[in-house]
Image: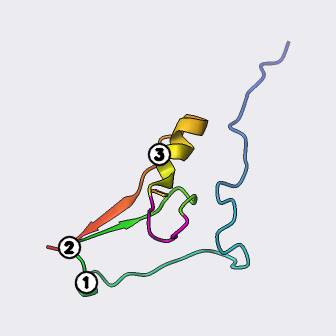
Amino acid sequence: TPMVVVKAEAKPINPEIRKSEEKVVDTVVVTELSKPLTVYCRCWRSGTFPLCDGSHVKHNKATGDNVGPLLLKKQ
Ligand code: FES
C-alpha cells in the first residue's frame, strides 16, 4: 500500500483583523519608540491589534498553540 503523508492543515490563522487588506503590514521606526517597552501581537487574536492584549494566553490554552508577542525595547 502507498505511504500516506499527512500534512498540517492549511487554514488561516487571522480570524478577523483587517481582512480587507491584501497583506497586513505595520512599520515601526525603532528610534521613535515613545515607551521603554512596546508589545506587538503575533497571534492575530488581540483586540488591540497590532498591540498585544494578552489574548494569546487564551488562544494557546484553547488550541495547544505556543504563539506569543514581539517585544520592542527602547535602549
Ligand atoms: Fe496576540 Fe498577545 S494577543 S500575541
- Residue 43: x and y in percent read 53, 55
For label 1, the residue is 34
- Residue 19: x and y in percent read 71, 72
For label 2, the residue is 36
Query: Reading the chain from its start, which is encountered first: label 3 or label 2?
Result: 2
Queried whether the magenta region covers residue 33, the answer comes back as no
Query: Dot 2 lies on which element?
Result: loop
Q: Nearer the viewer, residue 5 or 54?
A: 54
Circle 3: residue type: Val
Q: Is residue 29 above or below residue 18?
A: below
Q: For the magenta stretch, what is the residue range?
A: 47-53
Disc 3 crowd rating (10 Å Cα; few below 14, some 14-19, many 20+) is: some
Corner quadrant of residue 74: bottom left
Q: Residue at x 54, y 77 (%)?
A: 25
Q: Is residue 54 above or below residue 6?
A: below
Circle 2: residue type: Pro
| Residue at the right extreme, as displayed | 1
Circle 1: residue type: Ser
Queried whether the magenta region covers residue 51, the answer comes back as yes
- The majority secondary structure of the magenta stretch comes to loop
Q: Is residue 60 left or right of residue 28?
A: right
Disc 1 crowd rating (10 Å Cα; few below 14, some 14-19, many 20+) is: few
Q: Is mark 1 within 8 Å of ligand 1?
A: no
Q: Residue at x 57, y 60 (%)?
A: 44
Q: Nearer the viewer, residue 1 or 69?
A: 69
For label 3, the residue is 57
Q: How many labels sit on residues?
A: 3
